Image (cartoon, rainbow, N blue to C red):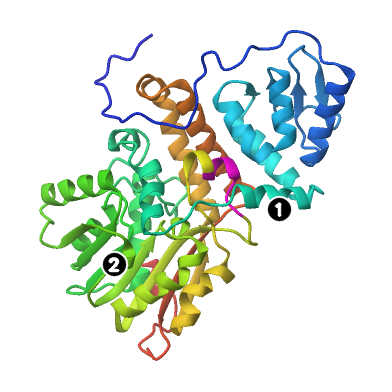
Amino acid sequence: MKNNKAPLSLPVAEGYGTLDGEFAASTARASVLERWRARKLLALTGDPPLRLVLWGGEEIAACPGAPIARLLIRDRGALFKLLRHPDLHFGDLYSLGRIEVEGDLVGFLEAAYRAAAGARVRKHLKSVLDWINRPRANSLTGSKKNIHHHYDLGNDFYKLWLDREAMQYTCAYYPRAEMTLEEAQRAKMDYVCRKLELKPGQRVVEAGCGWGGLARHMARHYGVKVRSYNISREQIAHARAQARAEGLAERVEYIEDDYRNATGTYDAFVSVGMLEHVGKDHYRTLGEVADRCLTARGRGLIHSIGRNRPEPMNTWIEKRIFPGAYPPTIAEMMEIFEPNGFSVLDVENLRLHYARTLAHWLERFDRHQERIEEHFDRAFMRAWRLYLAGSQAAFTSGSLQLFQAVFARATDNDLPWSRAHLYT
């Protein structure tokens, strides 16, 4: 049944393929060699508690007992692709319908991630594949292309599943488990403001502002003036329109430019959800921007997806969804602070908060699958559903973290003696 709601205003999405005519599902039974290859695939991925169902109906299980889910492989070529490079080809094959997950998608991915983390994988081959599929450059030109690929899909698309008030596309904060997405995103913005110890009359510079919700929240509720830098045209247009509509245009300035070009002096430097797009080679530059912008008693906060040990972003996500993305470790983040003599005051990991945020996003995304499929196509819808489910599973399985780091100048002694101000 077709959706009669007003059409979305969305551009054409590229790079997700098409379902029609991409493959012909195999019907013949799998050979002995193909069944052996299916068992090899399970072994290479750590023997997860899953069951493979081949195109001829044969089932291959890694271990006895009821599986968490079943993976349907619809043709021989799909099996060969999974064996060659599962991190890349799983997403493409799922998007195109050549493989299907029967059961809970998040639970399937969570089990797969946990098994893979303990598997004795072919480390040499993986390092070669990671180098071949390394993140795209985040130079001034490269960053603009990377951001356009992800964030300029159209504001109407993101409005379908982000929070309705501020369109926060970053980890929410759930001090109470029963919070709605809107409540948790407001709580996150307040939490950031308390960590920065914002006071009326102060000036704030923001590197990467999304749709501008945090900047408007800081101006409205904390009496500060904000200058926000962003290179996504779609996001800047929305942010400026919202600031005018909310009467905040005099207090919030949105600049369509790269963070590296930030100028002025400020009492606070904040970056929420942008470090993932900066790239390791540019962390020192980001620190230099904070150094030249912050006053002697200024505060800074970096909020970023991260990892416990160095590892690239999932190859498929980097190629199809988030080009140029890299989640840093805490040690890698120190390249922002150490060369500029900043003191790190506080580090917090909000990993499970991001898993809950993604659960809320996925639930809303699922409610609008038909509209998304109509205005992009089914392959795009399946790709993005896999991306959201896979991200949730990555946080619940511990392969991704969410770090908030607060920093100040080493000579600043005007510091709180406890963390009480964070929990008012």
Residue at numbered disc 1: 127
What's the magenta region? Answer: 312-318
Res 157 quadrant in image: top left
Observer able to see residue 71: no
Pointer 2 with pointer 1, Cβ within 8 A: no
Res 28 quadrant in image: top right
- As helix, strand or loop, the secondary structure at mark 1 comes to helix
**Looking at the picture, how far across and down is residue 404, in whole percent?**
46, 65
Point 42% across, 76% down: residue: 407
- As helix, strand or loop, the secondary structure at mark 2 comes to helix
Measured along the vertical axis of the image, is residue 25 above or below residue 102? Answer: above
Q: Indicate left or right for 102 with 381 as reference.
A: right
Q: Indicate left or right for 352 with 257 as reference.
A: right
Q: Nearer the viewer, residue 176 or 260?
A: 260
Residue at numbered disc 2: 261
* Magenta stretch encompasses residue 244: no
**Looking at the picture, how far across and down is residue 63, in whole percent?**
85, 32
**Looking at the picture, how far across and down is residue 348, in whole percent?**
51, 66
Amino acid type, callout 1: Ser
**Looking at the picture, how far across and down is residue 250, in whole percent?**
10, 61
Quadrant of the image containing the N terminus: top left
Point 14% across, 63% down: residue: 251
Measured along the vertical axis of the image, is residue 232 above or below residue 64? Answer: below
**For the view shown, which residue lies furthest in the right direction?**
32
Point 63% across, 12% down: residue: 24
Q: Earlier in the sequence, mark 2 or mark 1?
A: 1
Q: Nearer the viewer, residue 189 or 208?
A: 208
Looking at the rendered structure, the number of numbered marks drawn on it comes to: 2
* Magenta stretch encompasses residue 317: yes
Res 264 quadrant in image: bottom left
Amino acid type, callout 2: Asn
